[in-house]
Amino acid sequence: MLVFTNHNRIIRYYFYLLFIYTHAYESMQGSHSEAAAHCISAMASSIPKLLLLLLCTYLHTLVAHGGYDLQSYKVLHAGALKSATINCSQPKVTPSSGGVTVPLHNRHGPCSPVPSTKAPTLEEMLRRDQLRAAYITRKYSGVKGGAGDVEQSDVTVPTTLGTSLGTLEYLITVGIGSPAMTQTMLIDTGSDVSWVQCKPCSQCHTQADSLFDPSSSSTYSAFPCSSSACAQLRRSHQGNGCSSRSQCQYIVKYGDGSSGTGTYSSDKLVLGSSTVKNFQFGCSQSESGNLLKDQTDGLMGLGGGAQSLATQTAGTFGKAFSYCLPPTTGSPGFLTLGAATSGFVKTPMLRSSQVPAYYGVRLQAIRVGGKQLSIPTSVFSAGSIMDSGTIITRLPATAYSALSSAFKAGMKQYPPAQPMGIFDTCFDFSGQSSVSIPTVVLVFSGGVAVNLASDGIILGSCLAFAANSDDSSLGIIGNVQQRTLEVLYDVGGGVVGFKAGAC
């Protein structure tokens, strides 16, 4: 201790440096290991090794026991708030034996295979998103019961199959026919019937690829009215089936008034290096409304109904699929059919026999900044669905109020900003190269805790959640909160899984 006694001034100087580094890291809110690494790299050249060890041990003790819960915050860098580095290379994914993975891109980003168009403003996206969320809620408007609402829905499936393609953001590229014709299609876990535009088309929108030409495919077949596939389509989707024509007709109607009609058909589907025979889809030959403004070739349904891609390919790839939605428009994600089911945290999947398209989960709690919010479990009794087509997560009103209050309390260093559309918890990040935000963890049935990426917490400069009108409405886990997670839909195992940092 003689050294310390004779060098009091030096000790005080180094502890002053430690104080500076500690408070710098408190503002950045990194992890324990980050703080230790920074301490070593920054001071190793000037501090005696024994003293360095003592100082870094002190720092770790201070962080772990002195109230600095650095792991309860995330750093959101300026690139996530404004622009980000473009990287269109495909993430490495390992499907299960016999599975297949295809790239997935944001339709408005530089990696998109469709022609570049002006992306809608955030305000416009939120407006469209509110319409979709309201439509989904109406589907379940007659639901009765408690925590099993998603399983016990009494609602009748309406003839309207969707709201608008305007909220759908993610694309895959497939081949249809023999020889295969490239088609770029939006994906949607809330839809069953897949469709593409076909020749001859009396009224179709301009698209990236050539219209699918049934007459050029040696494996194309239109379903007759007497087919079991047409009968199943009639049973599951009212308004579809046969009219005066001998071929099975399908129609998709959207809540914004747009629609598409055509022939229900089958053909060979090419996904990466794999081929699916007799894939059922709608061959669209006439459209109206906002569908005429779209530029994609069609829609690929990933819902739980009989007509969806996931259900039709279950015999080929197995009853599990997964996807990862990228954090930015300038990075890629993926869709895997025949997904490996290990390495995920899993929660039970809830299903509705009346609305089979949707995959339900039960949210139980929310943590903000490492602390669980005081929300009665009964608040979440209406259940929630996972939806790739809804942008923003909808929470019961009571749960959202608690989340918003706790998040604001952790963001006092940033001035509040004016609300934006459905967002009422916004901040002024002017002049900031990075911001520290409290962690947000969604806890699902079985204690499954999903720690959201920073890109899944803030959108623009606002908390990326919205409130339902009450606590009895169905919740929705939107695609912003799903970003960077590999989300597993293991229909055979009856679970939904989550794996962090997959893309």
Image (spheres, helix red, strand yellow):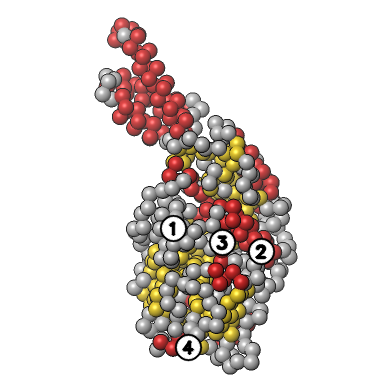
> Given the image, on which type of amino acid does mark 1 rest?
Gly
- Residue 221: which disc? 4
Q: Quadrant of the C terminus?
A: bottom left
- The image shows residue 456 at horizontal and vertical percentages of 51, 49
> Given the image, on which type of amino acid does mark 4 rest?
Ser
Residue at the location (36% across, 75% down)?
Answer: 274
Tell me the residue that label 2 is attached to: 135
Whichever of callouts 1 and 2 sits on the residue coming sooner in the sequence is 1
For discs 3 and 1, the disc positioned in front in the rendered view: 1
Residue at the location (49% across, 59% down)?
Answer: 118
Displayed quadrant of residue 391: bottom right
> Given the image, on which type of amino acid does mark 2 rest?
Tyr
Q: CA distance from mark 4 to mark 1?
A: 35 Å
Tell me the residue that label 3 is attached to: 167
- Residue 109: which disc? 1
Mark 1, residues whose alpha carbon is within 10 Å: few (<14), some, or many (≥20)? Answer: many
For discs 3 and 4, the disc positioned in front in the rendered view: 3
SS under mark 3: helix
Q: In the picture provided, is 198 more to the left or to the right than 5?
A: right
Q: How many marks?
A: 4
Question: Is the C-beta separation of discs 4 and 1 under 8 Å?
Answer: no
Residue at the location (59% across, 66% down)?
Answer: 164
Whichever of callouts 3 and 4 sits on the residue coming sooner in the sequence is 3
- The image shows residue 286 at horizontal and vertical percentages of 57, 80
Q: CA distance from mark 3 to mark 2?
A: 12 Å
